[in-house]
Amino acid sequence: MTRFALAALFAAAAPVAAYAQAPAQGAVLVVDVNRVLTESAAGQSLQAQLKPQLDQAQARQQQLQQQFRTEQENLERAAAAKSVAPETLQQQARDLQQRAATAETELQGRGQALQNAQNQGLQQIINAMNPVVSTLLKERNAQIVLNRSATLQTIAGVDITNDVIARLNQSLPRVAVNVSAAPAASAPAPAAATPAPAPRKK
């Protein structure tokens, strides 16, 4: 979740089309979409909005993992020492599994909310980037713009990434996203182990 998932801006067939048409020199431009999404002001604002939520989700995950690991170890020690009635151990194990499943659902919900917010922000950036790229295409009298990831080598002057970022910073300085996730609820406290009843003296 820490890296931005890159949306495909141009069709995979674009490089093939460029070679097939054998365009004249200067007819092809290149833009590094990854840099635009991460280095632009809008991209930076998206990361800044998502980071607190991401940090909170990771802290919650670590908290739950540690709690359930401790409970599992306690159950294993109680079983080895035979200090708890078997029926009680079985019930506590079932309770632990149920609470672990509930926690997993919570974490998945948080992750999905973050993913949705990230996609929402990236789409805003791409929507604002497209007209910028179109304008530069016309200004440079070019015929096609390729994503840099689809190229092997380029010559000086064909990469318009810096220009795209500069103009995008003017038209879209920031994005607004909504991370709608349920607030974290404390995991239920582990049930106390119940010692097995002492045998009656005859």
Image (cartoon, rainbow, N blue to C red):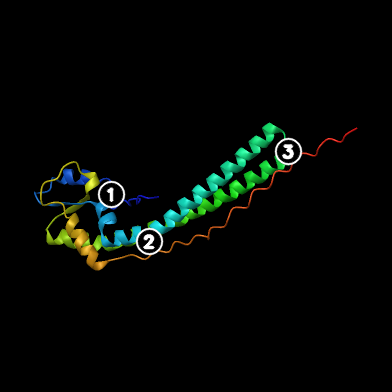
The residue tagged 3 is 84
Q: Which amino acid does label 3 sit on?
A: Val
Q: Nearer the viewer, mark 1 or mark 3?
A: 3
Mark 1 or 2: in front is: 2
Say if 78 sits above or below 105 in the image.
Answer: above
At label 1, the amino acid type is Ala
Q: Which of 31 and 67 is in front in this view?
A: 67
The secondary structure type at the circle numbered 1 is: loop
User: Which label's residue is closer to the chain start, 1 or 2?
Assistant: 1
Q: How many labels does the image show?
A: 3
SS label for mark 3: loop
Q: Name the residue under label 2.
A: 49
Task: Give me the residue at 75% from left, 38% from top.
Answer: 85
Q: First in sequence: mark 1 or mark 3? A: 1
Q: Where is residue 99 in the image (x, y as percent from the top left)?
A: 62, 48
Classify residue 169 by image quadrant: bottom left
Q: How far apart are marks 1 and 3 (CA)?
A: 63 Å
| Residue drawn at the location 65% of the way across and 35% of the way down | 77
Q: In which quarter of the image is residue 154?
A: top left
Q: Classify 129 as above or below 66.
A: below
Residue farthest left in this picture: 25
Name the residue nearer the viewer: 29 or 102: 102
Tell us which disc is closer to us: 3 or 2: 3
- Callout 2, which amino acid? Gln
Residue 122, placed above or below residue 171? above
